Amino acid sequence: MIKTNIKDDFPIFKNYPDLVYLDNAATTQKPRGVIEAVSNYYQKFNSNVHRGLYQLAEESTRIYEDSRKTVAAFIGADQEEIIFTRNTTEGLNLVAYSLGLNLKKGDEIILSLAEHHSNLVPWQIIAQKTGAVLKFIDLNEDGELDLNSSSDGQKGGLKGLLSVKTKIVSLAYISNVLGNINPLKEIFKTVKKFNSQIICIVDAAQSVAHLPLNVKSLQADFVAFSGHKMYGPMGIGVLYGKKEILEKMEPFLGGGDMIAAVYLNHSEYKQGAAKFEAGTPNVAGALGLGEAIRYLQAIGMENIEAKEKELTAYLWERLENFPNIKILGTKDLAKRSSLVAFEYKHVHAHDVGAILSSSNVAVRAGHHCAMPLHKNIGVQASTRISLSFYNMHKDIDQFFIGLQKVGKIFAF
Ligand SMILES: Cc1ncc(COP(=O)(O)O)c(C=O)c1O
């Protein structure tokens, strides 16, 4: 059970007691412990890592590396498999460049039609540079990934798309628009059975704060996520990479801290995650992320899942029957996370968002960085509610008061 006054852990709700924050998929609010950890770092530990020989620098290094251990334990990885990045986007770009630039003309990369631009644009760039080809897993009417159909050459079911040329499969765990939880365990099992050399990548941006994640049981080779979407600070993210693959990859960025030795015309690189962390890292961010993980663990991921499921069902019951609303994504609540996007017929999502804002309700409105997905499902823009375990029934009630206003203003 999650305590009823959980919002008291989040100072922003003290500053804005009337705020109904339903935009947690964009970024979550930060618990006091995370804010204090970051502030404490700059007051008591600030110094650069991996280089100073004095005590403060050693403390700072210890803090940074302890955070790596915390992240590794949280997702079932080894600490040398954890690369600190700025965010999910940087993690996915890192893999795309360091791994993808080795692709040959005609090699195939499988994505889905429901990807966030962060898991699409980097692969487009790589495909343009190498001549590799992008293939897309199609969606059924509910926006669920099609696993079985044949391919029309560009899109189709997973099994129809897999070929001897497939080199990479990169998919979101949870769609940031449809809210569907993709069956990645089953998908990666199928992929690895087809060819164990195919690299399986997870965009975990929308799942990491909501579902337990174990990289080994998923059979994932890479997993990218952002600290700010899991109650941690902005500017810190994680890329998990399987050790054996990291060893063979070229660095993404070159510079200080990622080298073992430097000569005038070439350099030798460090091994493991260190090879991919050039320059001064975000130590305070890493500490804040570690603190966020400890906060989530203290609540318990299973309690978070249970509370968010209950809140989603409460929202769903009324939204499903609300006039002129078309919910995007699967209707099977067992396959959904706590984000729900919808189209309000004949009203632009920006108008819906602005009217909700006048009732102190913060939601996201637009294409949510998933333009091809919106085009594919024939929706120009949508309004998205994304719940956190700190939301309450009364937040959802307030959302419906705002939604009724939309109907009144547009005279439905
Ligand atoms: C599914 C998904 N992938 C990637 C991202 C990019 O995250 P960031 O902006 O933190 O890099 C987002 C952000 O909304 C997302 O929802």
Image (cartoon, helix red, strand yellow):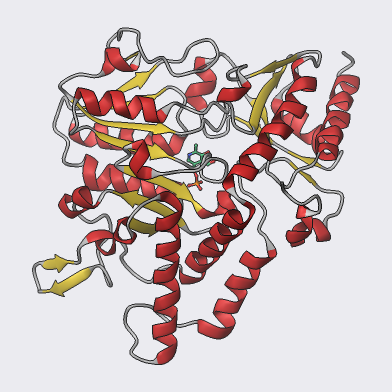
> Percent from the top left, x then y, of residue 341?
65, 26
Q: How many marks?
A: 0
Res 170 → quadrant: top left
Position of 2 relative to 70 (above/below): above
Residue located at (41% from left, 91% from top): 55
> Percent from the top left, x then y, of residue 20?
80, 44
Res 164 → quadrant: top left
> Percent from the top left, x then y, of residue 237?
45, 55
Residue located at (68% from left, 22% from top): 342
Residue located at (54% from left, 15% from top): 377
Res 361 → quadrant: top right
Position of 193 relative to 308 (above/below): above
Residue located at (76% from left, 28% from top): 315
Q: Position of 370 compared to 29: left or right?
A: left
Position of 50 relative to 266 (above/below): below
Task: Residue at the far front: name it.
Answer: 1
Q: Position of 141 compared to 7: left or right?
A: left
**Where the C terminus falls, by quadrant?**
top right
> Percent from the top left, x then y, of residue 257?
28, 72
Task: Residue at the far bottom: name it.
Answer: 54
